[in-house]
Every structure is written in C-alpha cells, then in structure tokens.
Image (cartoon, rainbow, N blue to C red):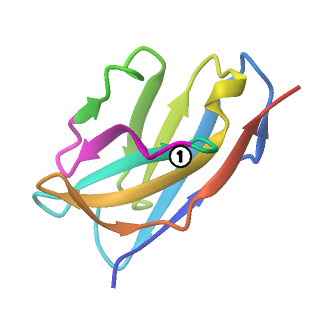
Amino acid sequence: QVQLQEAGPGLVNPSQTLSLTCTVSGGSITTRHYDWGWIRQPPGKGLEWMGSIAYNGKTYYSPSYKRRASISRDTSKNQFTLQLTSVIAEDTAVYYCARAKVASYDYWGQGTQVTVSS
C-alpha cells in the first residue's frame, strides 16, 4: 500500500518561499512510469494541478505555476519537494501530493493547510 505524507509550514509570510515535502512509503518514487505530483485546493475552489516529477526525474509544470514553482526529489529519502516562490494570499490552500500513472492520480496524501498571511 502506497502512502504519501505532506509536511511543511502551516503559515507563510507574503513574498516568502513556500517549501513542502512529500514522503512516500510503500513504493519507490523511481519506479518506472509513475509520476509524483502536487495539487492544491484554495478555499471554495476546485483542485489545481501545479506540477509533477516523473520516475526519471523529469519535471512538468502547469503554465499557471511554471514561473514560481520548482519540484525536486531526494531519492535516498524517497521524498519529493515543492518550492513556490513569492507567495501571496491567493496561494492559501490545502496542498496535496499524489501519485499518478498515465495522468490518473490514484494515491493521495491527506493534505496540508498552508496559509499565507503576515
């Protein structure tokens, strides 16, 4: 059973960089043909795909986040990380990490609330 767990600060000041880490257990992030993604849900809105990192380390980003988001990984820890620069209040959301195969996400973390506020 694959499990994902997000970790990061619950509160971030505007203009700072948000950093979230997803720790994966029960499966390797280097297993072929799986992608590992970040998805967020702002209050009162739907899910927004931000980007993903493939089993081979290749990254993909939504055009909406390409300028500010960066996804990386640490294969020794079986973790992948999202960094979002220059955060604003509108970046307040529940952030999820998830596993995908052929663009269908099958395993999700429980989500972590991030609030951008001074």
Say which residue label 1 marks: 41
Name the residue rendered at 53%, 46% in the picture: 41
Rendered location of residue 70, percent (x, y) = 43, 28
Between 75 and 89, the one lying in front of the other is 89
Between 100 and 27, the one lying in front of the other is 100
Name the residue rendered at 63%, 56% in the picture: 112
Determine the residue located farthest toward the front in the rendered image. 44
Rendered location of residue 10, percent (x, y) = 76, 48
Name the residue rendered at 65%, 26% in the picture: 90
Q: Is residue 53 magenta?
A: yes
Q: Is residue 67 above or below residue 74?
A: above
Q: Which residues are magenta?
A: 45-58
Q: Is residue 18 above or below residue 98?
A: above
Kind of element beneath mark 1: strand
Quarter occupied by the C terminus: top right
Q: Is residue 30 above or below residue 28?
A: above
The kind of residue tagged 1 is: Gln
Rendered location of residue 8, percent (x, y) = 67, 49
Q: Is residue 52 magenta?
A: yes
Between 54 and 37, the one lying in front of the other is 37
Q: Is residue 36 left or right of residue 22?
A: left
Rendered location of residue 22, percent (x, y) = 49, 56
